[in-house]
Amino acid sequence: TMCKYMKKIFIHIGTPKTGTTAIQKFLSENYKKLLNAGYYYPIVGRGYRNNTRNISNPEIWMNGTVLKDLSSFKALLKKFDTLKSKNLILSDECLFMKGSNDWYGEDIKKLLNNYEIKLIVYLRPAPDYLCGLWQESVKYRYTLTLEESIAKSNYYEELHTLKNLMCMIKRENVLIRIYDKKKLFKHNSVYDFAQSIKLVSPEKYIISSDKINTSLDRVSANKILFFNKIARLPPDDNSKLYKYITDSSNKGVSVLNSMPKKLHSSINKKYADIEEEITSKFFRGEKLFEDSDYTYVSVSDELDILFRLKATLVACLFRFKATQVAILKKYYRTLIQRIKRYLPKN
């Protein structure tokens, strides 16, 4: 049996597109208040994944990658043990994904054995999730269509990895939440997370009402995709090229509702077995997802000729500018390398 005075570690591992950024922002903005309430959300590891800056979330909010660095994690636990706080929170939405799911090895497992562990996972129906991932990737200059993006997705394998990870940590230590506005506590991911970690009176804390990741309607996504294909710029977190489109977005058909019925059905069929496995292990016979009210609305991929002309012109200008910058960077890099050859070596 678990000692009731044992310190607890909450490990929030995703998935993406389930209000994770809002949760991490809440934890960061309320750092001192949470610490006083017995919840420690450490600064270590924030903003980086695999030792590189995470371009899809440049704000220094996430910290779960510390689990992938044994020495840093040991140092963190040593500090946690000296604090009065009984709860440590680690959060990274991709700790179950391909290339990021190897943190739960024997060394980390041994360290975690001294604490009560609670793995927090948010899931959403596969069609909805895959549509959300696509419209988000479009913002960051990717050029795949919705159908191409879904075809290339690793989500099926990642759900199996997630199930195996949850099994290793044991059912009683896993909390699965369904990301559905109707099911979330107070219809809000931050309030829901606060309830999951048993935080008393979350309304006393700063909870941002801003939409951190703006959703796109299908027409807006098609416009940005068209621009991306012409501009051929590398993925970049600093791009503001789509701002004038996202500002007027959300007035049309959602990406999910623009998905062809046949594709929607095929996704549901593909993911049915793994969802059933997760359900049987963690929900004791209950259904993982309810049948959602799904309305298919056809959205044309044909774009206004005036928009195409403007977008083509702007894309060419940006591509030219990006090319010039790349040439200058290469020139200065080569120049610095040549200068270094003549510098005395210490």
Image: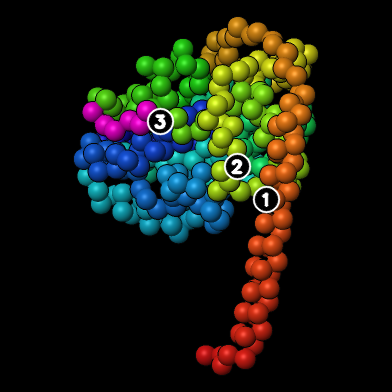
Q: Quadrant of residue 117?
A: top left
For residue 79, side relative to residue 58 (left or right): left
Q: Is residue 47 above or below residue 126?
A: below
**Whole-percent x, y for residue 168 in the image:** 55, 35
Distance of label 2 from label 1 (alpha carbons): 10 Å
Q: Say what amino acid the circle numbered 3 marks.
A: Asp
Q: Which residue is mark 3?
A: 210
Residue at the image position 65 percent from the left and 62 percent from the top: 325
Q: Residues within 10 Å of mark 2 (few under 14, many from 20)?
A: some
Q: Secondary structure at mark 2?
A: loop
Q: Which residue is mark 2?
A: 241
Q: Which residue is mark 1?
A: 318
Residue at the image position 46 percent from the left and 34 percent from the top: 212
Q: Which of the pair 136/101 is nearer the observer?
A: 136
Q: Which of the pair 85/54 is nearer the observer?
A: 54
Labels 3, 2: front one: 2
Residue 333 appears in the picture as rendered: yes
Distance of label 3 from label 2 (alpha carbons): 20 Å
Contact flag, marks 2 and 1 (Cβ < 8 Å): yes
Residue at the image position 35 percent from the left and 42 percent from the top: 28
Instruction: Locate the N terminus and report the quarter of the image it occupies.
Output: top left
Principal secondary structure, stretch drawn in magenta: loop
Q: Which residues are magenta?
A: 204-209
Residue at the image position 35 percent from the left and 31 percent from the top: 208
Residue 160 appears in the picture as rendered: no
**Whole-percent x, y for residue 165 in the image:** 57, 35
Contact flag, marks 1 and 3 (Cβ < 8 Å): no
Among numbered discs 2 and 1, the one appearing first in the sequence: 2
